Image (cartoon, rainbow, N blue to C red):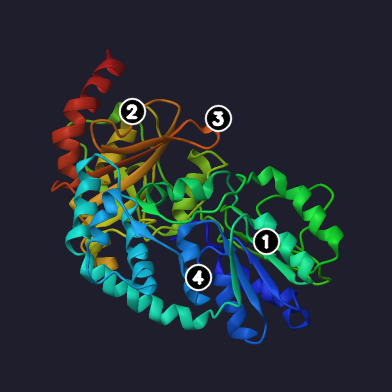
Amino acid sequence: MFYGAVPTACIEQVFRILDFSAWKAAYVCCSGSFRIERALKAKFPQLPVFGNDVSLYSSAVGYLACHREFNLRFEGALSFIEERPDVNSFFERVAALLVACDMARYGGRKNDYARKHFDYYVENFELFFNRAKDRLDRTIPEMPLDGYFCGDWRKHVKQAIESGAGILAFPPFFKGDYESQFKFIEDNIHWPAPDYDLYNPKMLGDIIDEVDASGAPYCILSDQLFEHRKPVLEYVTGRKVPHYCYARTDKSSVRHLYKAPEPFAYDPIDPAKLTAESKVQVVQAESRHMDFIKDIYLQKTIIHTTGVANFLIFIDKMLVGGIIYSLPKFPTFGHSTIYLLSDVTLCREAKLSKFIAYLATSNSLLDIVSKKLISRIDFVVTTARTHNAVSMKYRGIYELLNRREADDPAEGNIINYGSKMRAETPQEIYSHWYWPKYGKSYVQKRNA
């Protein structure tokens, strides 16, 4: 549910450097999916633990864990849930909310892809509803909270200091993180939402100084480094966003998980040598080989992420680029969707980037991914970041699913695209689409 969830390995580091047995109580700020609360209760069952968040998702689950309730009513696009006879108790309403949070990815969007997925949830709500109830039955006993505060995490910090408790804070790394995640939910569910000031990560340095000066035991996680303060914990995986921990402890922990890219010999594509008879070859690749290519041809600031399937694309034994697929960030009906994580091209000429993007929808590649995941894949989604209204690479190949401005104006627009699987082989895509549409004219101009 939370794409900013703290990695389990990082939480394990926190437990190694902090002595929670000496804490009077633990006030967790920004509980999210309650990973830290469940870990605390498993290892220190007698330690009083108090959760906190501003989101409806966390607040509903937190209240349920504390045997408390609040009014929760489904409206608008989710009003069909309110009409169901089996959604009465607070437990049932929280289970229905979990399903609604999964539906939120598609709610309010006008394209056929989103409507199809949203309607599938509506038609099969009973199935997802029963799964959510089972999930709550398993999870709630693992996190018997001693209290939950629905409100600004900075107020929760002050409450912890006043009560002599310890503080575990995992605030968002990005401004407006919660608000963007839960917009559809807030628009279609009525509940006593708390008032709070929008948190900006730039405030964190001053907040840590205030907590440190109070003398309270604490652990605050961030992706930021501060000139006057050294983190006691570092968790870094490849080129992903780092996690730094600031805490009152003499212990420290540093964990860098990194697989070095592995170089390999190749001939880069020369588009002037392409012909109508050129042969396309697709080769499955290891992540270390893909990282080697990305290190050369992508911006250094782009974070490496391991996919579930990787392919290198050759034309006449010349390397054109690579394709990396990963699991989608959000659940999709029937598990039919795969996420195109990267479609790197070695050459910007001759519209080869469009060729690679088109190739990523081929059933020849997706059949391999389907067998690997033991799940039929028939739809590809991807994300483009651009200052333009559309991405020229995906225009005409993929359907524009949605577009929004990035939180940082300097990053431009964030545009999500999708495409159905195409029943075309890589060679057919080259011979019937790419060569007559782009390759032939490029070669003729070069040779003129």
Please state the horizontal and vertical placement of residue 23, each as a whole percent of the image.
76, 78
Q: Residue at x 40, y 76 (%)?
A: 136
Q: Foreground: 374 or 94?
A: 94
- Residue at disc 1, secondary structure: helix
The Cα–Cα distance between marks 3 and 2, rounded to whole angstroms, is: 19 Å
Residue 327 shows up from this direction: no
- Name the residue tied to disc 1: 156
The Cα–Cα distance between marks 4 and 2, rounded to whole angstroms, is: 47 Å
- Which comes before the other along the chain, label 3 or label 2? 2
- Name the residue tied to disc 3: 410
Numbered label attached to residue 392: 2
User: Vertical placement of 35 versus 311: above or below?
Assistant: below
Marks 3 and 2: which is nearer the front? 3
Please state the horizontal and vertical placement of residue 179, each as a whole percent of the image.
49, 47
The Cα–Cα distance between marks 4 and 3, rounded to whole angstroms, is: 39 Å
- The amino acid type of the residue labelled 4 equals Tyr
Q: Foreground: 262 or 365?
A: 365
Lateral position of residue 57 relative to residue 350, left or right: right
- Residue at disc 2, secondary structure: loop
Tell me the quarter of the image containing the C terminus.
Answer: top left
- Which comes before the other along the chain, label 4 or label 1? 4
Circle 4 packing at 10 Å, graded few (<14), some (14-19), many (20+), is: many
Lateral position of residue 81 relative to residue 307, left or right: left
Furthest toward the top, the residue is 448
- Which comes before the other along the chain, label 4 or label 2? 4
User: Vertical placement of 227 versus 74: above or below?
Assistant: above
Circle 3 packing at 10 Å, graded few (<14), some (14-19), many (20+), is: few
Q: Are marks 4 and 1 in contact (CB under 8 Å)?
A: no
- The amino acid type of the residue labelled 1 equals His
Q: Foreground: 293 or 55?
A: 55
